[in-house]
Image (cartoon, helix red, strand yellow):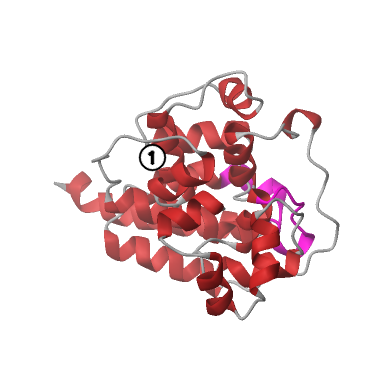
């Protein structure tokens, strides 16, 4: 977080003034003390990060109310991303509006504990994988979305190795993860301490919309996800029908 603030050219006092939090509390957090989760929620919008991600960055558990709604829905994310990147901008916007219009279903069961293989040690790789899990993406879902949105084709087990620090998180791979997470690559570089080359090629508009959609759909149940997936498929079918007739 200290590196991120330096990158943003924000001092602890600036951050405190913008959030109304005591400057000493901010300094204590930046010096390594375990922060109050309420403090992180207050800071999140100021540093332009999701509160759930900021909790992960601080090494704290994500409470149920900030966690993805339905773990089973994550299995459909890659299929939806594949549809989304083939749609024109107007339809991508319409799809995101449809997601936001769906009601927030009440959680009836607690969030299941993470499997042992997804309990990562401290480090850049673990941070990235935990942020992907915040988007309801397990290793398989992450690998599929990575292949759809970036030049990287990695096995699910390779992602697990990155999370556990057994495979290097390279600068170019970090840029690809930034694409998936819809987090600016230079911000992610500051958070992880991994320098990235200047002049990275920006993600195209369709990929950027799909990455933002990945965050939006984390609040959906599997039934709601299927509804959105059916809508995206209908959009694609309508778009491709005139070409078929031609």
Residue placed at 53% from the left, 40% from the top? 192
Residue placed at 55% from the left, 79% from the top? 17
Q: Residue furthest top?
A: 166
Residue placed at 67% from the left, 53% from the top? 31
Residue toward you, 7 or 186: 7
The residue range painted magenta reads 58-76
Q: Is residue 105 visible?
A: no
Q: Quadrant of residue 179?
A: top left
Q: Residues within 10 Å of mark 1 (few under 14, many from 20)?
A: many
Is 66 a magenta residue? yes
Residue 184 placement, left or right of 154: left
Is 245 a magenta residue? no
Q: How many marks?
A: 1
Residue placed at 82% from the left, 47% from the top? 112
Q: Is residue 234 above or below residue 48?
A: above
Residue toward you, 203 or 188: 188
Residue toward you, 69 or 168: 168
Q: Position of residue 214 (x, y in %)?
A: 51, 52
Residue 83 placement, left or right of 142: left
Q: Residue furthest left?
A: 246
Q: Is residue 141 above or below residue 238?
A: above
**Could you tell me which secondary element the residue under label 1 belongs to?**
helix
Q: Residue furthest right?
A: 109
Q: Position of residue 210 (x, y in %)?
A: 41, 52
Q: Is residue 99 visible?
A: yes
Mark 1 highlights which residue?
149
Q: Position of residue 21 (x, y in %)?
A: 65, 76
Residue toward you, 75 or 235: 75
Q: Is residue 9 above or below residue 19?
A: above
Q: Position of residue 150 (x, y in %)?
A: 37, 35
């Amino acid at each position: 977080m200290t590196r991120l603030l330096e990158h943003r050219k924000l001092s602890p006092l600036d951050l405190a003034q913008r959030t109304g939090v005591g400057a000493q509390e901010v300094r204590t957090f930046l010096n390594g003390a375990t922060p109050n989760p309420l403090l992180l929620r207050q800071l999140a919008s100021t540093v332009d990060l999701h509160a759930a991600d900021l909790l992960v960055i601080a090494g704290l558990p994500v409470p149920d109310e900030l966690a993805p709604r339905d773990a089973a829905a994550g299995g459909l994310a890659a299929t939806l991303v594949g549809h989304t990147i083939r749609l024109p901008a107007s339809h991508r916007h319409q799809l995101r509006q449809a997601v936001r219009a769906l009601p927030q279903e009440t959680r009836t069961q607690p969030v299941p504990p993470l499997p042992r293989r997804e309990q990562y040690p401290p480090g850049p790789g673990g941070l990235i994988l935990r942020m992907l899990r915040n988007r309801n993406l397990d290793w398989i879902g992450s690998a599929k979305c990575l292949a759809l949105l970036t030049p990287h084709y990695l096995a699910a087990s390779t992602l697990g190795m990155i999370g556990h620090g057994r495979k290097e998180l390279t600068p170019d791979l970090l840029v690809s993860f930034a694409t998936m997470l819809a987090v600016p690559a230079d911000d992610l570089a500051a958070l992880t301490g991994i320098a990235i080359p200047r002049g990275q090629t920006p993600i195209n508009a369709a990929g950027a919309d799909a990455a933002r959609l990945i965050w939006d759909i984390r609040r959906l149940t599997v039934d709601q996800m299927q509804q959105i997936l059916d809508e995206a498929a209908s959009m694609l079918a309508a778009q491709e029908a005139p070409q078929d007739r031609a």
